[in-house]
Image: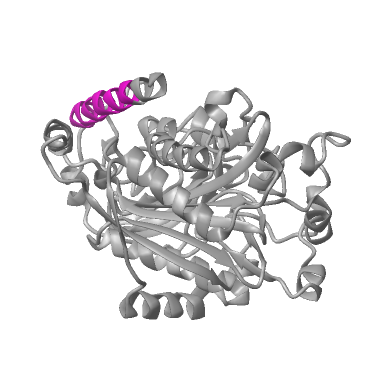
Amino acid sequence: MTPLPADAASREADCHRDRPLDPRPAWRLLITGPAEGAYNMALDEALLDGAIAGGRPVLRIYAWQPPAVSLGYFQQLDEAIDRAEIARRGFGLVRRPTGGRAILHKDEVTYSVAVRHRDLAAGGSLMGSYRTISRAIEAGLQLLGVAAELAERSGHAKHQTKHNLPTVCFAQPAKVDMVVGSRKIVGSAQTRRAGALLQHGSIPLSIDAREHLAVMPGASSTEAEAGGPQLDELACGIADILGRTPSFEETAQALAAGFAETLAIELQPDQVSAAEDRAARELMAEKYSNAAWTAKPGSRKSAPDA
Amino acid sequence: MALDEYRFSEAHTWAKPEGDEVRIGLTDFAVNELGDIIFVELPDVGAAITADDALGTVESAKAVEDIVAPLSGEVVRVNEEVINAPELLNEDPYQAGWLIAVTVNSPQDLDELLSNDQYTSLVEETDEEDQEEEEEDLFSDDE
C-alpha cells in the first residue's frame, strides 16, 4: 500500500479548484502497434517505472503479434492452460505483472495506462482509478457505437474469491471489468507500486470461443458452475456489437479521444524512447521471456525482491 | 478492538512487538481498500526485509499491490495460514491475518512508526478524500 502524504488532500483540493484555469495536463500517447507478448508486458512495466520516476502519464495502445496467452501475476500455470497447443499454434505465453486471469490476445486492441496516483484527477485509490479509466474507455467505445459500462454499475459483476476464480478472464466479469448487457467486453488488471499504477486491458474485436477452448480448456465454462454458460455467451468483441470489425487504427483513435475528453487531458503523440526500449528489453530478459517467471506458481512465499 | 500495542506505517502496515519478535500485517484500512484478497506472496524465513521496500505482494479485485515493510529486520516466521486462506486478511487483519514475524535490526525503529491515534487521524483524512472522490463519481454518473 502506498502512503498518502499528509498534505496530499489539500494539494489535490487546490488542483481541483485550479483545473478550469490550467491548461489540460499533458499525457503521452504511444500507439505502438503489434509486438510479441514478452515485449508488450516488459514495455508496460518499463512505462510504470517511468511513472514512478516522475515521468508524464502514458496511454499506450497496442496489439499482439504473434497472438499470445497472458496469465495473471498469481495464476497457476496448470492443466487449464494447454501449453502444447499454444506452442503448436505458434502463440506466445507470458505472465503479466498485473492481477486477473488468463487472456488469449489475438484479434484485439490493448490499452495500458501508467500514471502516478496524484496525476489522476479523481485520485489513485483502487476502485477510484478503475472507475476513472473505465469512464474513459466507455467514452471511447461509445464513439465507435458500443454502449459498454462498468460491471460494478451494471449489476452483472461476479463476486470473486480464491475459490471461484475462472481460468479465463473473459469467462467472468469482475466488478472492475466492462460489459455490454451481461457480456464482458473489456478485461482489465492493475498493479500498484510506489505511488503509481499500471492498468492494462484487453478489448477484443472478436472472440473465437473454440480457439479459446483449444488453448485454455478451462474456458469451457466458469468451472465453478459446470454446465454453465459457454464463453461466447459470457463475452463479446466489438464486432459482435457493431456487425463490422473496426480497424486497429480506428479503435485506437476512438479510445484516445475517449481518454482525452473524459480525463480532460491533452494527449501528445509520442514514441517509445531509447531508454524505455532498453529498459523493456532488460525486463524481457529478466522476466517476461524467462521460463521461470512464466512458470512462477501463484500464492507462494518468495524473497522480497523476487 | 484495542490497538494500543500496535504501531503503524503510512503505507498501511502494522507492527506489534511480541517478546523478541515483531509481528507485521496489513491494517483494516488497507484490506478494506483492496476488497476481497485472493492471493498473498510473502518472503521466506531468513529473508531480510527493508523499511519502505516491498516485503511481498497481495492481489485483490484484479490489482496486484506491494506490501511495504514498516521496518527493517529478518523474517523468523511466516503465517502459512494466510497464504493458504488469504480471506483471513479480510476477516481478521490484526490477529489471524498477521503476515510475518521479524527480528528487527533497530528496536528504536518502532518508535518512529505512528501510534494508533496518529494513524487513525491519517486514515480519517484519507477517508474524507475518498468520499469526495466517490461524490465526484456519482456526479459523473449522473451526467
B117 in the magenta segment: yes
The location of residue A283, given as percent across then percent down, is 45, 75
Q: Main secondary structure of the magenta part?
A: helix
Q: Is residue A72 left or right of residue B32?
A: right
Q: Is residue A49 left or right of residue A234?
A: left
As drawn, the residue found furthest toward the front would be: A244
Residue B65 visible in the displayed image: no
Residue B122 against residue A232 in the figure, above or below: above
Q: Nearer the viewer, residue B16 or B33?
A: B33
Per the rendered image, the range of residues in magenta is B116-136
Give the left or right position of residue B49, taking residue A31 as reference.
Answer: left
Q: Is residue A240 positioned above or below A28 on the image?
A: above
- The number of discs equals 0
**Name of the residue lying farthest toward the right:** A227
Q: Is residue B110 visible?
A: yes
Q: Residue at x 63, y 61 (%)?
A: A70
Q: Quadrant of the N terminus of chain B?
A: top left
Residue B28 pos. (x, y %): 39, 30
Q: Nearer the viewer, residue A9 or B90?
A: A9
Q: Tell me the quarter of the picture where residue A170 sits.
A: top right
Quadrant of the image containing the C terminus of chain B: top left
Front residue (pair A105, B103) = A105
List x then y, in percent, for residue B77.
47, 53
Residue at image x 61%, y 35%? A179
Q: Is residue A287 above or below residue A193?
A: below
Q: Is residue A216 rendered magenta in the image? A: no
Q: How is the image coloured?
A: one colour
Residue at 52% across, 37% down: A176
Q: Position of residue A40 (x, y in %)?
A: 51, 68
**Residue A91, quarter of the rendered image:** bottom right
